[in-house]
């Protein structure tokens, strides 16, 4: 395994632990990985209704 691959795995583990800690604190995380879906449009529309608005 290359150093780059190790770094990617370590980064992935780090963010997995961070997400677990956040979820355990009771915070809800809303995500969408389906471009074109209504949920994705609501989350990523910065103009008039998106969570990213602002």
Image (spheres, rainbow, N blue to C red):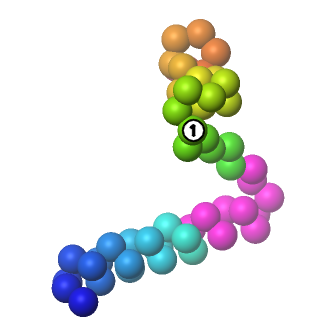
Q: Quadrant of the N terminus?
A: bottom left
Question: Which of the 4 image quadrants contains residue 52?
Answer: top right
SS assignment at label 1: loop
Q: Residue furthest top?
A: 48
- Reply above or below: 8 against 37: below
> Which residue is at the front of the view, 7 or 41?
41
Count residues near mark 1 (Cα–Cα under 10 Å), then give few for <14, some for 14-19, many for 20+. Answer: few
How many numbered discs sit on the rendered protein?
1
- Give the x, y percent position of residue 5: 27, 79
Q: Main secondary structure of the magenta part?
A: helix
Question: Which of the 4 image quadrants contains residue 9?
Answer: bottom left
Q: Is residue 25 in the magenta section?
A: yes
Q: Is residue 26 left or right of residue 5?
A: right
Question: Which of the 4 image quadrants contains residue 39?
Answer: top right
- Give the x, y percent position of residue 2: 19, 85
- Give the x, y percent position of residue 51: 61, 27
Q: Residue at x 64, y 15 (%)?
A: 49
- Give the x, y percent position of residue 21: 66, 69
Kindly tell me whether residue 46 is visible in this rendering.
yes
Q: Residue furthest bottom?
A: 1
- Reply above or below: 14 against 40: below
Q: Residue at x 75, y 53 (%)?
A: 27
Q: Residue at x 38, y 79 (%)?
A: 10
- Reply above or below: 26 against 51: below
Q: Is residue 24 in the magenta section?
A: yes
Q: Residue at x 48, y 77 (%)?
A: 13
Give the magenta-colored segment's residue range. 18-28
* Residue pointed to by mark 1: 34
- Reply above or below: 35 against 50: below
């Amino acid at each position: 395994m290359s150093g780059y691959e190790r770094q990617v795995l370590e980064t992935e583990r780090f963010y997995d632990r961070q997400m677990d800690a956040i979820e355990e604190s009771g915070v809800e995380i809303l995500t969408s990985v389906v471009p074109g879906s209504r949920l994705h449009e609501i989350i990523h529309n910065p103009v008039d209704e998106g969570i990213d608005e602002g």
